[in-house]
Image: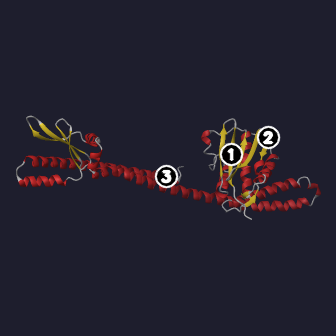
Amino acid sequence: MIPQWLNWRLVLAGIAIILVSGTIFYSQYVSGKIAREERKNVEAWVEAQRTILNSSDSASINLATKISTENTQIPIIETNEKDSITGNFINLDAALVKGDSGYLKRKLAEFKRYNNHPIVMVLKEKPFTSNQYYYGESELLKEVKLYPIVQLIIVALFITIVILALQTSNRSTQNQLWASMAKETAHQLGTPVSSLQGWLEILKEHETNNDIVPEIAKDVNRLLLITDRFGKIGSEPQLEWRNPSEQIHYMMDYMKKRTGGHVSFIFDDAQIKNVVTRLSPPLFDWVMENLIKNALDAIEGNGTIRITAGINELNMLIDVTDTGKGIAKNHINDVFKPGFTTKKRGWGLGLSLSKRIIEQYHKGKLFVKWSEPGKGTTFRVILPLQKQHA
C-alpha cells in the first residue's frame, strides 16, 4: 500500500510536469514568434540603411533614419562581402569592443550559431561589393527562453517545501502514535504488575518460598522498570547528574547473568570513572540494554562484547563492539528505522527508540561507527559533556 504522503508527492509531481511542459511549449511558441518579428525588424533596419545611403529624397531619408534609430534592442554586427568584420555594430557594449580586441569576433561567432543566414545589402554589382548583417537575440527573447527554467525552479521549490511539510506532519503523527501506544502499554501493564506485587507479599509469609521469592521479585522489579520506561516515552525526561559508568556496569551485570558462559563481556571505563553528565537513568539503561541485546543476537551466544568509554573536549564517547555477524552495507542505513529487523521475533523498535532517546532527549548521537560482515559491529553513543554548577 502506497503511503498517503507518497500519493501526494506523485500528484504534485504530475501537476509540476503538466505546468512545466505547458510553459515550455508556450514559451517556444512565443519565442519563435518574437524571433520572426525580430528578423523582420532587422530586415527593415537594413533596408533603412540602404535608403539612407542611396536615396536623395529627404522624406525617405527621414523615415529611414527614424526606423534605423528605433532599434535599441537587437544587437547587429556588419561584415563585408568577404565576411570580414567592418567595425560597424549597434547595441553592443562599446567599452568592451574597445577594450577587448576579440570581443566582436566572439559575438559574431555567437550570432552565426543563432542564425547563420545574414541579411545582405548589395552596394555595387561590378565589382561586387556588399555588407552582411548578423544579429543576435534581444534581451526580451532571452528572458522568454529563460522563463520555463525559472518556473521549473519555482515549482520544484514549491513541491520540495510541500513534501517536506507532509513528511514532517507524517513523522509528527507517527511519533504521537508511538507515544500513545507506549503510554497505553504502560497503563495496561500497571494493573497485573500491581497484582503480582500483592501475590509476592503473600508468598513472603511462607518460609518454604524463600528460595523462589527473590527471583520472582527480580522479575517483578523488571516489569516495573519496563512499565516506567514505556510511561516516559513522549514525555520530557528528568535528566540527572550521573556517572554513565555505573549505569553501564549495572546493565552489563544484569545481561551477563542471562547469558551462557560462552560470551565474554569487557568494559573499559578508565577514562570516565570520575566523569558525570546529565542522564535519564531509566532511559539510558534502556539504550544500553538494547545495544547489548543487539550485540548478543549478533554473536549468537558465542563471542565477545566490548564496551569502551572515553571523552574528548566536548563529548563522552561510548562504543559497544561485538564479534558477531556484522551488518550488510545495504542495511546500515536501515537499522534505526522503526520495524526493521533481521530477527524472526521482535518488532524492530529497540534501535529506533534508542536513537530517539539519545538524540532527542539527551541531545547526543547514536550511529553505526563500523561494521563488517563476518567480523562484527560497533555502535557509538555520543553524549555532550556539560559543566555541573554548584
Query: According to the image, label 3 marks what residue?
Result: 7
Label 3 residue SS: helix
Residue at the outermost right position = 207
Vertical order, 171 against 110 (above or below): below
Q: Nearer the viewer, mark 1 or mark 3?
A: 1
Query: According to the image, label 2 marks what residue?
Result: 263
Query: According to the image, label 1 marks what residue?
Result: 379
> Who is closer to the viewer here, 34 or 260?
34
Vertical order, 214 against 378 (above or below): below
How many C-alpha atoms fall within 10 Å of the one at disc 2: few (<14), some, or many (≥20)?
some
Residue 333, label in figure: none
Vertical order, 328 against 349 (above or below): above
The amino acid marked with disc number 2 is: Val
Residue 267 at what x, y percent from top left? Answer: 78, 45
C-alpha separation, residue under disc 2 versus residue under disc 3: 48 Å
Horizontal side of 59 relative to 132 (left or right) equals left
Horizontal side of 333 relative to 12 (left or right) equals right
The residue drawn where x is 73% and y is 50% is 288
Residue at the outermost left position = 57
C-alpha separation, residue under disc 1 versus residue under disc 2: 18 Å
Residue at the outermost bottom position = 390
> Who is closer to the viewer here, 134 or 8?
134
The residue drawn where x is 79% and y is 40% is 263
How many C-alpha atoms fall within 10 Å of the one at disc 3: few (<14), some, or many (≥20)?
few
Of pointers 1 and 2, the one earlier in the residue sequence: 2
The residue drawn where x is 13% and y is 49% is 48
The amino acid marked with disc number 1 is: Phe
